[in-house]
Amino acid sequence: MKLSPKSSDVRPETPSRTEIDFQALAHTIKQWGMALGFAKVGITDTDLSADETWLLDWLDQGCHGEMDYMQRHGAKRSRPQQLVPGTTRIISVRMDYWPAQAEAAEQLLDDPLRAYLSRYALGRDYHKVLRRRLQKLATRIQQRIGPFGYRAFTDSAPVLEKAIARNAGLGWIGKHTNLIDDKGGSWFFLGELFTDLPLPIDAPASAHCGNCQACIDICPTQAIVAPYRLDARRCISYLTIELHGSIPEELRPLLGNRIYGCDDCQLVCPWNRFARPGVENDFTPRQGLDSATLVKLFAWDESAFLANTEGTAIRRIGYQRWLRNIAVALGNAPHHDSVRAALEARCDDPSALVREHVTWGLREQARRKALPAG
């Protein structure tokens, strides 16, 4: 739905910058953001110098794995004014996505014959949803003050979005490296509007993890190697989404039935008792992906995969990695004739990547069959 300016929103003449009350404008921008479905809106400047030091050290340690794009843009990721010249302020927004209507996450993780997909991926691709809302917000600002410089981002460019959101007061970066809000948990997406408007900035959020390390203890692959430090090379989200080749054999048994991402560190976080269900209909689970069996999903041909993941973030991994991930999960499942038959049906898959993981899965099924009963 296209936003139409109300008569009260449009001045007869565009005001000059010296005529604009930026304090009042910042307050109005936050109201507009909330009306557009954002749960929280904050404003910060472009100083990310401390985070740049952390980022460079993380990259030097190789913790980004194959995510070469983390290095590709040089300092643009930590220096917003280089990414978008003229940027002086960043409007940071949050949109909640927890799908309250989805099958209970813990229930799925306890059922090794069903597939677990990260809760954020069950509905429409968040990139499209947030970008569209950010553009509407920019349009409202332009209707009020006239043309201004801006660019919208949603995990779609070299942007340190969590550090920006923290500086804008949206939450603190937890020990699992996700952003946490003390009144809303961590089940939310982030987006940014880089602007050249000299808006007043908000106070950064303070941290409240204290002595808790539940996220560190629960991580299936121990990817959180220290508080506030994630080694992506061990992270299930990286292994099932970002990694293009073979999943390391020693890590495969630790994936369990997780075929797209992992939420364990968020599921165990005590702050998520304050999380609020998402109200955006676009994030409602699609195609029964919140409760499907591994065997059913593994039976999809490529056209079914494309049709059933249309409009979702899942499509980005492609059909071969989809099958690779499910083959691992089937290998991790208890021995069952239907599981073995599903794997055997793909022994001659055209993809060497899929065949490799199918072979591993069948070997694991055979090993489980040979185990003594009980």
Image (cartoon, rainbow, N blue to C red):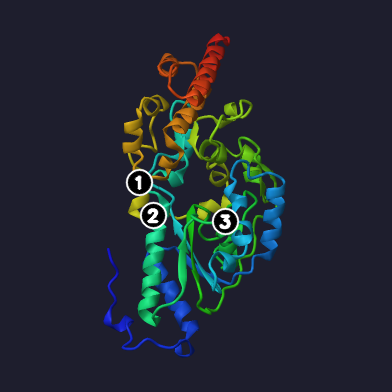
Residue at the bottom extreme of this rendering: 19
- Counting residues from the start of the chain, the first of labels 3 and 1 encountered is 3
Q: Nearer the viewer, mark 3 or mark 2?
A: 2
> In screen coordinates, is 315 left or right of 246?
left
**Percent x, y of residue 258:** 50, 34
Amino acid of disc 1: Gly
Looking at the rendered image, the quarter that the N terminus falls into is: bottom left
Mark 3 lies on residue:
179
Q: Tell me which residue sits at (36%, 74%) in the image.
A: 140
**Residue 12, placed above or below residue 300:** below
Mark 3 → mark 2, Cα distance in angstroms:
21 Å
Q: Quadrant of residue 88?
A: bottom right
Amino acid of disc 3: Leu
Categorize mark 2 by other alpha carbons within 10 Å: few (<14), some (14-19), many (20+). few
Tally of numbered tags: 3
**Residue 281, placed above or below residue 369:** below
Amino acid of disc 2: Lys
Q: Secondary structure at mark 3?
A: strand
Looking at the rendered image, the quarter that the C terminus falls into is: top right
Q: Tell me which residue sits at (42%, 33%) in the image.
A: 319
Mark 2 lies on residue:
128
Mark 1 → mark 2, Cα distance in angstroms:
9 Å
> In screen coordinates, is 118 left or right of 280?
right
Categorize mark 1 by other alpha carbons within 10 Å: few (<14), some (14-19), many (20+). some
Residue contact between numbered discs 3 and 1, judged by CB atoms under 8 Å? no
**Percent x, y of residue 263:** 53, 42
Q: Nearer the viewer, mark 3 or mark 1?
A: 1
Mark 1 lies on residue:
311
- Counting residues from the start of the chain, the first of labels 3 and 2 encountered is 2
- Counting residues from the start of the chain, the first of labels 1 and 2 encountered is 2
Residue contact between numbered discs 1 and 2, judged by CB atoms under 8 Å? yes
**Percent x, y of residue 323:** 45, 28
